[in-house]
Image: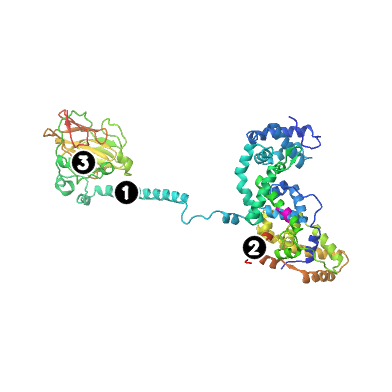
Amino acid sequence: MADVPKVVIRRLASCRVSLDPHPDANLLAAFVEQSLGDRERLQVLDHLAQCTDCREVIALAVPEPVAAVVARQPVSTPGLAWPVLRWGAAIACVIVVGAAVTLRHRELRQAVSGAGSPSAVSEPAVPGPQPEAMQSPGLSTVTGVEVARKAKNEVPSEGGVARAANEAVVPGRAKEDLGLAGSSSGNSTMVGGLAMSGAAPATASPVLKTKAMPIPRWALTADGTLQRSFDMGRSWEPITVSLESSLRALAANGLDIWVGGTAGALYHSEDAGEHWVKVQPITDGRPLTADIIGVEFADFERGRLNTASGEAWTTEDSGLTWQKQ
Amino acid sequence: MSTSPKKGGKATAAHHAALDRAVAELYPKSGAESLGLSREDFAGILAEIAGKHVPMASATEIHVFCCSLRIEELVLARACAAGHNQAWEAFLLRYREKLFDIATYITKESSAGRELADSMYADLYGTSTRDGQRISKLASYTGRGSLEGWLRTVMAQEHVNRYRRRRRLVSLDEESEEGTQFAAPEREEVVGVDPRVEAATDEAITALPAEDRFVLAAYFLDERTLADIARSLGVHESTISRKLDKLAKSLQKQILANLGRRGMSRRQAQEALQVDVRDLRVSIRERLTQENTHSSFSEKKAEAREEPG
């Protein structure tokens, strides 16, 4: 235990009155702010050690402790402050969107990996419309009137991707033949990403904007089999679209893909080939029956078919109605 | 441009050059022009301050000194003192509320704080005149520390001076009732203390560095808390605690040694000191447990007012 003899205090007090002039406020303020040089600081300290008045001034001139300053601030209202709420909301939005994207991505991956398996064929949302499946509830055939009614009453969700195999096989619409420039023939044709077969421009895809699905690459083999790749062409999986027809041409735009083949076979998928809809172009009551050798879609609505007979069929409404040229 | 760092006007050419260089460097970024101070005014202010604080400095030291000043605040204060309205608007915008807050902190009560702040406003603006010129207290600001720190110090000085003036009018009974804030404990008349003990103690105290003596005086005479002293010196509270402990031990040891040199045997010196310690000792540990129990004169006064009756 350290003690100070009282004589020390008495002797300190005996010399407490300084005859020297007091340091002015500038020096004392600089001393408090620790901005004096060593020499001046020692001079001020030497004076302070003897001068009660200046020690009092120094003690009062020292800024308030932080705790006291905080205590003098207005009491904040309970709950979270606006900056906290704003940042919290922003972070929450990022987390929610990220989680949704991740979940959707996994879901699609699982669906894609299951598409080529035999068990996937029996599932309701089975890819690769078979002739039998076309009569099943999962791939029903509807009339043009019904499709038109659906088109009016239902807003295609997320670029129409949700419109799937159970929605429609269009038996006929406007039916006019157009002379399509052949985009594919007996040779294998590969389409990837936004590019469409032929010289179709790579327009911005609403699907791309709203979906976080991987964009596949497509290829048609010489024997008319559709193939899909999700790994930039390193591996390919066959996609069975129709057992009746041999496919001859395709057009892909993001997740949206059209394929055409022999005997006017035309199929459309809005979800990267997970579900297919058979489309029957009809105009003036006459269906397209010629072999489709070219498919072009400049965007999701405007398309053109070229047939082996030299006809050209066009649509302005994603295949709901057709005009023959 | 010719400026003089010395009030006698005997500045060397090197001093002139150093000041001119400082003016050229600092004037454009000081904001003086926008506040109505010309380059000549600015040079005169720098020369005055350099002459006051570093009268014998070298040219390099003068330049370094000028660059260390709070130039923007200095210009604002001097522009206010010169009566430029734009400067006053800026000053009031920046310091009006602060002045009241500082005054309230110093006086520990709002009414006294308001009074002190109002008085300070009057001094800053300058209510008295000399040779037809209004004398503003802001003209004495030299930019060594911040303008806010200077205002705080000036108000603290004013508060202490007021208390000293008023203390002369306070009756002994009233002072006893209210307690004292500023006065160090009165010297107790101790009869029969060996003059050798006092001489040995004086010698030991004098040998201490200025900072140690300041800490001893602030703690034992002014009864400041460790936190108060630490904030004054810009160190941590524990540093002051360790310093005091060390000082107490070294002082006792040094006094005993000094008594030995004055002809006392070790035992005699210890007895002489122990008598004093036994009767009048101050326990640091006791003092440490009493931290934060010290209330100021104003606080006691306010408490007394709040009491019923």
Quadrant occupied by the N terminus of chain B: top right
**Which stretch appears magenta?**
B159-163
Q: Name the residue under label 1.
A: A104
Q: Distance between the residues labelled 1 and 2?
A: 72 Å
**B31 above or below B111?**
above
Q: Name the residue under label 3.
A: A152
Of the pair B294 and A223, the residue shown nearer to us: B294
Q: Which amino acid does label 2 sit on?
A: Arg
Badge 1: chain ID:
A
Query: For mark 2, does the 10 Å Cα neighbourhood hold few (<14), some (14 to 19), or many (20 or more) residues?
Result: few
Residue B234: give x, y in percent of width and height: 67, 53
User: Does the CB distance between marks 1 and 2 fall below 8 Å?
Assistant: no
Picture mark count:
3
Q: Is residue B102 visible?
A: yes
Q: Is residue A322 magenta?
A: no
User: Does the CB distance between marks 1 and 3 fall below 8 Å?
Assistant: no
Q: Residue at x 88, y 66 (%)?
A: B263
Residue B151: give x, y in percent of width and height: 67, 47
Furthest residue to the right? Answer: B263
Residue B11's quadrant in the figure? top right
Q: Element under label 1?
A: helix
Drawn side of residue A126 relative to residue A55, left or right: left
Q: Element under label 2?
A: helix
Q: Which residue is drawn at 64% across and 63% down?
A: B303
Query: For mark 1, does the 10 Å Cα neighbourhood hold few (<14), some (14 to 19), or many (20 or more) residues?
Result: some
State the predominant SS element of the stretch in magenta: helix
Residue B286's quadrant in the figure? bottom right
Q: Can residue A185 be seen in this view?
A: no
**A33 above or below B245?**
above
Q: Name the residue under label 2.
A: B305
